[in-house]
Image (cartoon, rainbow, N blue to C red):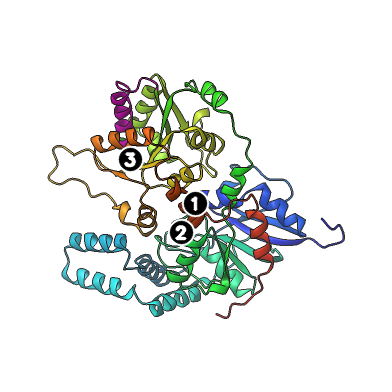
Amino acid sequence: MNAHRPIRLIGIPLFGKGATTHLHRKSLVDAFLQKGWEICYLIREDYVPLLEPLPGCQYEIYRPPEVAGDFSKKLLRYCQQLRRMSPPMDQYKRWQYQTLLSLNPAFWGRIHFRLQYLLSGYRSVMDWLIRCEGRIYRKLPSGLSKELRLGKIIVLGVGSPVDTLSLPITWWAIRRHIPVINLVGNYDSLSSNGFRGHPIEKILVWGPNMEMDARKLQGIPDQRIRITGSIRYNEMLGLKKQSRTEFFHSRGLNPKGKTITFAGFYYEFHYFEMLSVFKEMKKKYKDLQLIVRIYPNKRLLRSPLMEFFIEKSRSEPGVYLSLADPFYLYGDKDRVVLQIEEVDLWNILNHSDVVINIFSTIAVEACIFDKPVIHLWYFEKSGGMLKDPIYRNFPLQWHIQRLLSYGVMPIATNRMELMDLIEKALSSPGLGKEGRKKIVEEECGPLDGRAAERVVAASLETGNQLRT
């Protein structure tokens, strides 16, 4: 770094697990320092004891400002409800609309809901909502613990209605003419979470599919989109992974065995179902073993059913539990997870033979390691009820439909289908190889270990071009 170059400050809000997972990284800190910029992480007060500081950067407390007045609060909620319905042509949005409409008993309520759904399809309406919300957010204070001379701000996401914590600081920066760079943290962020909540000056996406989503679904001009790849996935390439023998021996498993990995969601049923499927298949495959990756959800981990599952699985031969919550193992069950455990995850995917999940990001991550992927999508029937529960129809979501379109991620809709698909994946691991390679290229973008450098370069080329 040039010692004579003045250090400039770039603010990065950390308001949740997504931001800490993707932006609280030493590689990013070092890449900015190399260019004469220092990162100041803006963190919530309750995160101070939870976050392990990185060397070479600053940390300042951020207190989210409160919107005053009942009318303003109601107006914001209404605007965000409309933005969440976009794009209405998405199969999942249509299914959600029709389901909620059928559950609404009020005549005028159904009429109003129909009108909302209709309006959500117009870009001009979305633009008006952004301006309307902006008028409210612009009046709020910064929320910063002290005045900072920020040259730029990098924000995770685009202010979608399912993630609104970043909206006040973004609009504050726009009002102060501070360039804002938006970085996409997940492969569904632009397609399935609704329309963005503010103007976009520069957005950094993973790969070609995200670039298309930014342009087609979020209405962002081409010149404001940059492909950088995922910092997290690019860092993964440099991780020193364990050898197959070392990995399996350290987890009490057989290096020569066939290994199924199940990455569960927050439904308890699937964990027990997967264990039952494994025990059934072991009658035929004696060397079969199971790795269960447990979702880092506090409600799930506090569930008596999951406590029983964890206790039972640990005594089951050929089963290894991996917890995405890094604190659970050490008895700190209530500590908020700001960054999921990754080292075990990457080793698991590297050495597994087939990966089963429930429409999660792990499906893409398994493709990076060229592992066959199966989606598990069925539930137990609820006895004694007049009507079975209505589960969110995840397979219809835009980003999931796109993954399914590659034809290499089959869906198991019952136990027999699941066991058949597992057998097929174990016997023909090369099947679908080209499709998985294409998913990685089009979803993840470049995987050359240089994503942090590209993020820095794209951020520093950004001036204040917004006129709002």
The quadrant the N terminus occupies is: bottom right
Marks 2 and 1, the one that precedes in the sequence:
2
- Which residue is label 2 attached to? 189
| The disc label shown at residue 440, or none | 1
- Give the residue type at disc 1: Val
Kindly identify the residue that appears in the image at 21 percent across and 73 percent down: 111
Please identify the residue farthest to the right as the structure is shown. 4
Kindly identify the residue that appears in the image at 51 percent across and 45 percent down: 368
In reply to whether residue 282 is colored magenta, the answer given is yes
Q: Position of residue 165 (x, y in %)?
A: 50, 59
Q: Is residue 58 visible in the rendered structure shown here?
A: no
Quadrant in which residue 10 is drawn: bottom right
- Give the residue type at disc 3: Tyr
Marks 3 and 2, the one that precedes in the sequence:
2
- Which residue is label 3 attached to? 267
In reply to whether residue 399 is colored magenta, the answer given is no
The span from disc 3 to disc 2 (Cα, nearest Å) is: 22 Å
Stretch of the chain drawn in magenta: 270-287
Identify the element where label 2 is drawn: loop
Relative horizontal placement of residue 207, taking residue 147 as reference (left or right)? left
Relative horizontal placement of residue 378, taking residue 202 as reference (left or right)? left
Q: Position of residue 173 (x, y in %)?
A: 61, 69
Kindly identify the residue that appears in the image at 29 percent across and 27 percent down: 276
Asked if residue 197 is positioned above or below residue 185 in the image, the reply reads below
- Give the residue type at disc 2: Ser
- Disc 3 crowd rating (10 Å Cα; few below 14, some 14-19, many 20+) is few
| The disc label shown at residue 454, or none | none
Identify the element where label 1 is drawn: helix
Asked if residue 253 is positioned above or below residue 407 in the image, the reply reads above
Asked if residue 216 is positioned above or below residue 103 in the image, the reply reads below
Which mark lies nearer to you, 2 or 1?
Answer: 1
